[in-house]
């Protein structure tokens, strides 16, 4: 069995949270992003702009500050937005304030905020 096949088997055995942590660590270590290439082109800074400064302006986080009275519907929406399993999404909702999504475009963050606030949750964009 090749090294690639062994790694693939180990990745298949990871939980969703472990896989997400692996992706985040690989992005940090190698300076890459798992985002679609189209998004990378759209996020490229203007000529002469500082790359780190441009990234800070375009990447924001959506923070679930409080769930409100409609917890079940908020939980369903968090699952739909993040792709998390029921257990992971419930932990996120139960332990608010927590980030729902990080490192996303401001437009996407505004859409997520709108969806969650319609369900009664309190959401912050940072």
Image (cartoon, grey):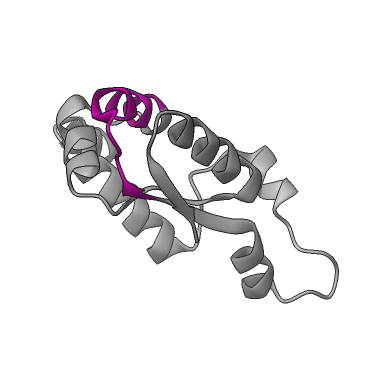
Instruction: Name the side, left or right, on which 42 lies relative to 85.
Output: right
**Per the image, is 65 magenta?**
yes
User: Can the viewer see residue 114 in this picture?
Assistant: yes
User: In this orientation, does residue 6 appear?
Assistant: no
Most extreme residue toward the right is 47
Q: Nearer the viewer, residue 19 or 71?
A: 71
Q: Nearer the viewer, residue 29 or 74?
A: 74
Query: Residue 21 appears at what percent x and percent y?
Result: 27, 50
- In the displayed structure, 6 sits above or below 63; it is above
The boundaries of the magenta stretch are 64-80
Residue 57, image x, y percentages: 65, 65
Question: What residue is at 55 percent from the left and 45 percent from the top?
Answer: 109
Q: Nearer the viewer, residue 86 or 116?
A: 116
The residue drawn where x is 17% and y is 42% is 94
Q: Is residue 64 above or below residue 118?
A: below
| Residue 110 image position (x, y, % from top left) | 59, 43
Position above or below: 122 against 54: above
Q: Nearer the viewer, residue 105 or 122?
A: 122
Expressed as whole percent of the image width and height from the top left, the position of residue 48 reads 84, 75
Residue 77 vertical position relative to residue 15 in the rendered view, above or below: above
User: Quadrant of the rendered structure where residue 30 is?
Assistant: bottom left
| Residue at the front extreme, as displayed | 69
């Amino acid at each position: 069995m090749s090294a690639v096949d062994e790694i693939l088997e180990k990745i298949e055995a990871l939980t969703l949270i472990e896989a997400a942590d692996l992706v985040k660590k690989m992005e940090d270590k190698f300076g890459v992003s798992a985002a679609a290439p189209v998004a990378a082109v759209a996020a490229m800074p203007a000529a002469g702009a500082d790359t780190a400064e441009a990234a800070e302006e375009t990447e924001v986080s959506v923070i679930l500050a409080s769930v409100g009275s409609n917890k079940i519907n908020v939980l369903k929406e968090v699952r739909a937005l993040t792709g998390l399993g029921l257990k992971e999404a419930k932990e996120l909702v139960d332990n608010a304030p927590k980030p729902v999504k990080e490192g996303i475009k401001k437009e996407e963050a505004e859409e997520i905020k709108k969806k969650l606030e319609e369900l009664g949750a309190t959401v912050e964009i940072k």
